[in-house]
Image (cartoon, rainbow, N blue to C red):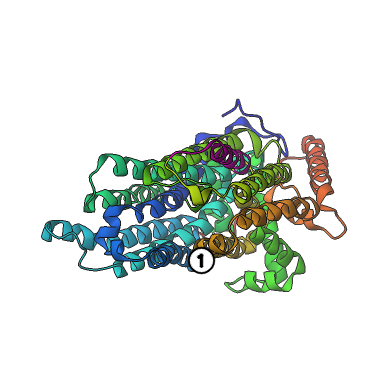
Amino acid sequence: MGRFSRVEDRPTPKEVYNWRVYAAAIIAAFAAVMIGYDAAFIGTSIALPSFKAEFGLDTKSASQFALISANIVSLYQAGSFFGSIFGYPLGFFYGRKVGLLVTAMVFCIGLLLREYEPILNTYQYKRSSRSKTGLGIIYAGRVIVGLAIGAASNLAPIYVAEISPPAIRGRLIGLYELCWQIGGVIGFWINYGVNIHIKPGRPQWLIAFAVQFIPGGLLFIGAIFLTESPRWLVSRDRNSQALKNLSYLRHLPEDHPYVVEEYQSIEDTIAHERGLVGAGFFGPLRTVFASKKLIYRLLIGSSLPTIFKSIGISGTNTALLTTGVYGIIKLVGSLIWLLFLVDTLGRRYLLIVGSIGGAFSMYYIGAFIAISKPVANATTSLSPGGRSAVAFFYIWTIFYSPTWNGTPWVVGAEFFPQHVRTFTQACMAASNWLYGFLIARFTPQMFLAMGYGVYIFFATLMVLSIFYVFFILPETKQVPLERMEELFEPGLKPWRAHSVVMARVHEQNIRAREERPSRDYPEKPSHEASDNS
């Protein structure tokens, strides 16, 4: 890992950047494979002729099928919204490790519920092309799976943020986004494969559904071996275990100066936050809603196949292939973002560049559709103008995937105080799924009503986001979690906040190094509270 550049907040032993912290981050981020796979496979799976025949959708009108498709997708989004909220008590009382274990278990239960009857019908009703259960079991399974996904989208990013050294925090949280894209690519190409190589029938669509057991099961197994977040342990007065876990994750002895400094900073910060609002389940809620600064930050974090058809593509294989290429571009973009950009260029610069390139691309696509009206002349092959529109959609993806695709998750997971982080992440994850629900539910109607205007609408939002990021969002790269509050001090402009706070951090580190030779370094912290680990 050392060949990738790092900008450190203080001199850091090389042991800190060890395999343990990367392994823990990868395991937690694997929750995103479940999310990415579902987002990629569900739309094309329910469009397969075999799925339509299984549930009698081949007899529905276009408007009826569109409504059912929207319900299948949006019920998952709705479940994820409520799951994000349920993730707060789960993470608050039981921790990040147990929370991820529970989400993986509930995810697999939802899959079993959804797959059991179709699999049973495969053996008991081999001559029947119709399911005996209808769509009800699909709807129920989608909601339960959504509940698990929502809770995981709350807990996984904050777990990774809490265990990460500042210099690579963006990279490690970014693994969540990379896993999302890996799941998406797998989902796209599995659907393409079953559509090409498996004859229509129950196994064709069931295989794509059943593959979800793999990421769910791997997350459950991996979560067993996770090291609980030291910051959460301190917040629950399990101080001895917190120090042991921090020492393990940093691959340094418990009395090493780096570990002692970081642990003491965590303990002091949490003690200070408790002194302001007290402990307890409702303490973080009271803190957030009583603080204008935290509400302001919460608003910042929360705000952060139809498309291909609208530029003249039709036919299942063509749409799948085009969408699969789109998924590969997103994966490559996310990999570049993860390895080279997020911890080097920072969050603000990436978001602004992504908005500029994305807006230009969307304006081009909207103009092409307005002028050429390709839907009226749709074919299984693209016209030269259609190719240019697809190219600009891919250009939009090139700008989007290494910027807005993952950066908001990084910012949301890192810039809140420890004592409210689980609650605020629940709010931001819930807002993400709420927006996803609204988009999944109403975008088809938007295209019917607005046509090319949908692209103009989203392009204009991207232009507005440039000013939003520049004037409102401070840079957070390399800022220690315990110093995030300083970025939002009254009178400190967002575009200057990062340089001011990092100057303070470096000045404090210099003073600490100068004082260290003149005194004995503090011994391993003692703990009054007993540890129930």
Residue highlighted by disc 1: 81
Query: Is residue 391 one of those drawn in magenta?
Result: yes
Image point 67% across, 67% down: which residue? 274
User: In the picture provided, is 367 more to the left or to the right than 487?
Assistant: left
User: In the picture provided, is 153 more to the left or to the right than 66?
Assistant: right
Q: Measured from the top left, where is residue 56 in percent x and y? A: 27, 64
User: In the picture provided, is 390 more to the left or to the right than 525?
Assistant: left
Q: Is residue 167 above or below residue 141?
A: above
Image point 50% across, 46% down: which residue? 312
Report the front residue among 245 and 196.
196
In this rendering, does residue 316 appear at all? yes
User: In the picture provided, is 186 more to the left or to the right than 133?
Assistant: right
Q: Residue furthest toward the right?
A: 491
Q: Measured from the top left, where is residue 418 in percent x and y? A: 64, 59
Q: Amino acid at mark 1?
A: Phe
Report the front residue among 162 and 468.
468
In this rendering, does residue 251 appear at all? no
| Magenta-drawn segment | 381-400
Classify residue 394 by image quadrant: top right
Image point 69% across, 35% down: which residue? 344
- Which SS class for mark 1? helix
Q: Measured from the top left, where is residue 75 in percent x and y? A: 43, 66
Report the front residue among 162 and 477.
477
